[in-house]
Amino acid sequence: MPQRFEFKGLVFIFLLFFLINSVYAANNNEKDLDECINGETGNLELEIKDPDNSDNFEPGDTINIEVKVRNRSDRTRDIKVEASLYNVDEDNTIEAEDSDDERLSPGDDERYEFDLTVPKKSRGLDDNDQFILFIKAFDENSESGACEEGSVDLDLELENKAVDIEKVNLLPSKVDCGTTSTLVVEVNNIGERKLKDVRVKASNNILNINKLSNEFDLDKFGEEDDNYIAKLYLDIPNNVETGNYLMDVEVIFDGERESENVGLFVECKEKVTDKVKKDKVLFVSQSNMPTKPIEDVVLENKSNFFTLILANIVLLLLLIFLIIVIIRD
């Protein structure tokens, strides 16, 4: 192969490699953050009242947000405020919430108050990362015409030892006496320490239930094995009344407890017995009507079996005759 073809091939491969890397780098530079489409326009004035810089938050916390917005443009606008809890190191929006829109005339201002709930379970939450609360105020009908941004730094703070009961379910939640229901409990470690020998307890004194799960460990918050699903099989007794019962659920860890409860409906149906009810007697007397001996019933077979056979033979002969006539013609 001539050298010029080898050279052109190498140049083509290099350009293709460069193009792929450029596209990949461009995609990586895109932030997972809902910023103003065309940048800040200057038509709005944004002031973050709450939270303050360097405020702490924990998994499951509710962040109270208060923002003041002024319309500096010469037209009436429908202004909405959006808040995003953003992990700067991971380039990841953890949670976002927005306010209702308010109509602002030129020169008017408005206070927006709403809440953002931090999820209790998220891989984007790491107490070593940097977080901001990103605030964007914009015209809902024309974001490119009016948009303003702001942010405050927030610090993720974890308790030393803490768990969260994420889900509690009884399957089924309606049972009959003498049957079994399965309690399913999902537990998350939301603390900064690994927890060992954790157990789940289910109890109800009326139903005579007091059951413990096997022991399990939970890695510290944010690690792969920081959650666990425990299952307990609860035997429902026979001698209880029909009704709703509250099942107490506890997660026991390192000398501490986290509690929750869940409802269970038990139905006990009355059993049918062969006992004759008291004061009710059934009398059986012999009838004085004359009796007639029971005669054997004879089923007569009136089938026209032989007639059918004869008819079939005649039809067969007729068919043979017709075939012979057709062949001769």
Image: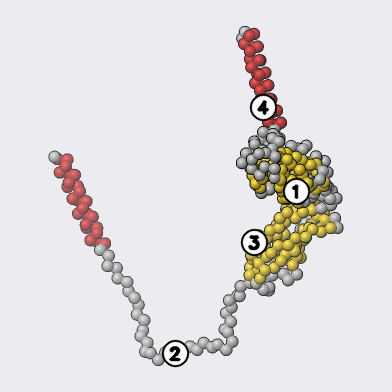
Q: Nearer the viewer, mark 1 or mark 4?
A: 1
Mark 2 to mark 3 CA distance (whole Å): 54 Å
State which tag comes first along the sequence, 1 or 4: 4
Regarding mark 3 in the picture, which secondary structure is present there?
Answer: loop
Residue 154: x and y, percent? Answer: 80, 43
Q: Quadrant of the N terminus?
A: top right
Q: Nearer the viewer, mark 4 or mark 2?
A: 4
Mark 1 to mark 4 CA distance (whole Å): 39 Å
Instruction: Give the amino acid at mark 4.
Output: Val
Q: Which mark is residue 23?
A: 4
Mark 4 to mark 2 CA distance (whole Å): 103 Å
Q: Nearer the viewer, residue 74 or 83?
A: 74
Residue 123: x and y, percent? Answer: 74, 43
Q: Which mark is residue 66?
A: 1
Neighbor class of circle 3 (other Cα within 10 Å; few <14, some 14-19, many 20+) is: few
Instruction: Give the amino acid at mark 2.
Output: Gln
Q: Are marks 1 and 4 in contact (CB under 8 Å)?
A: no
Q: Nearer the viewer, mark 2 or mark 3?
A: 3
State which tag comes first along the sequence, 4 or 2: 4
Regarding mark 2 in the picture, which secondary structure is present there?
Answer: loop
Q: Are marks 1 and 3 in contact (CB under 8 Å)?
A: no
